[in-house]
Image (cartoon, rainbow, N blue to C red):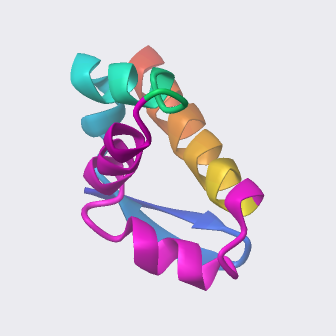
Amino acid sequence: MKTLQYDGMTFEYDERAPRRFSVQKALALGASDPAGFYSALDKIFCGHSDEYAEQLDDDADRMLGLLDRVTLAVGGEAKN
């Protein structure tokens, strides 16, 4: 598990989850399989995606921004 700062708050995430094919596939198919998309978010955010959304004022754009930050962090780790 790793943590990152976003919007002045600390969030925990599983750095392995975004690298999994099943998670990437679920995120990509979000429009046709919303349940799979949200399951993937729970895998990434260690079961705390609903809690994190509440902390971000239930703002979908901010939640996607958090997901982008995780993706960037994981991508940077992969290069090291």
Q: Quadrant of the C terminus?
A: top left
Residue, far front:
32
Which residue is found at the position 70% from the left and 78% from the top?
8
Horizontal side of residue 21 vs 71, given as left or right:
left
Q: Give the quarter of the image for residue 45.
A: bottom left
Q: Nearer the viewer, residue 66 or 49?
A: 49
Q: How many callouts does the rendering have?
A: 0
Give the x, y percent position of residue 61.
Answer: 76, 55
User: What residue is at 45 percent from the left and 23 percent from the top?
Assistant: 29
Please, is residue 59 above or below residue 42 in the view? below
Q: Position of residue 31 (x, y in %)?
A: 55, 30
Q: Is residue 46 above or below residue 73?
A: below
Q: Which residues are magenta?
A: 33-61
Please tell me in which quadrant of the rendered image residue 51 appears: bottom left
Q: Is residue 52 magenta?
A: yes
Q: Position of residue 18 (x, y in %)?
A: 36, 32
- Residue 78 placement (x, y as % from top left): 40, 20
**Is residue 77 found left or right of 71 in the rendered image?**
left
**Front-lying residue, 78 or 48:** 48
Check the image and report above or below for 69 versus 54: above
Q: Main secondary structure of the magenta part?
A: helix
